[in-house]
Image (cartoon, rainbow, N blue to C red):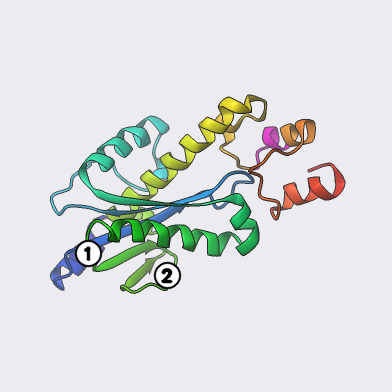
Amino acid sequence: MDLWQYEKQLYNQRVNVIGGTDEAGRGPLFGPVVAACVVLPRNFKLDGLTDSKKLSEKKRNQFYDYIVENTIYGIGIVSPEEIDKINIYKASRQAMITAIRQVQKKISLEYVLSDAMPIDIDIPVMPIIKGDAKSISIAAASVIAKVTRDRILYEIDQKHPEYGFKNHKGYPTKKHLEAINKYGLIDGYRKTYGPVKNYIETGHC
């Protein structure tokens, strides 16, 4: 598959500044949702770049460094409290819009490719289902979003190692649920998510 297919179509229509946007962290019980928007130069080359979930952590970190050095990018972060207030779908979209706005401060964006998310914003947006595996710009954004979020969780893990955040990144694994049952909740849990809600109501996930 040509990961440049969508970008090339737009270049052919004389659209030159294209941002790809994606988010990380819709499923976890803990922590923020993080989105990134990335504009690649036309000569950008990074062999093996694809959906961040398909890459090893080592590879993601290497790609992250390269993307940060060689692109224009923005990051949007929406807190667990805000997720509980407006729901994860709206929070993901809000994070993407923040990331896009960050990019717009640096360059005049003409078009955005998003990973499946319709975004109501003042520039054209094309939502692409499984976009992180079909568009090079969205794939780059998925790496920035995922690594940024993982690093936030590593910091939390240093303060609260008993929860195992460095291993599960806040997702509802068996060990994570066992840790909640044993140690209770700390700030940063999404209280509207099933297992957390159950713990608040019954004292057990």
User: x and y percent of residue 71 in the render?
Assistant: 23, 47
Residue placed most toward the observer, 189 or 67: 189
Q: Can you give x and y, in whole percent of width and height, for residue 117 in the image?
A: 44, 66
Q: Residue at x 66, y 30 (%)?
A: 163
**Residue assigned mark 1:** 108
Q: Which residues are magenta?
A: 172-177
Counting from the top left corner in percent of width and height, residue 69 is at 23, 39
Looking at numbered disc 1 in the image, what kind of residue is underneath it? Ser
66 or 91: nearer the viewer: 91
> Count the marks: how many?
2
How crowded is the residue under tag 1: few (<14 C-alpha within 10 Å), some, or many (20+)?
few
Disc 1 to disc 2: CB gap under 8 Å: no
Name the residue nearer the viewer: 5 or 109: 109
Q: Is residue 43 left or right of residue 54?
A: left
Q: Quadrant of the N terminus?
A: bottom left
Question: For numbered disc 2, what is the local secondary structure?
Answer: loop
In the rendered view, does 176 fall on the left or right side of 21? right
Q: Which mark is residue 119?
A: 2
Q: Position of residue 103 (x, y in %)?
A: 30, 57
Residue drawn at x 54%, y 60% as measured from the top left? 91
Eyeballing the image, is 198 above or below 183? below
Q: Residue at x 32, y 38 (%)?
A: 64
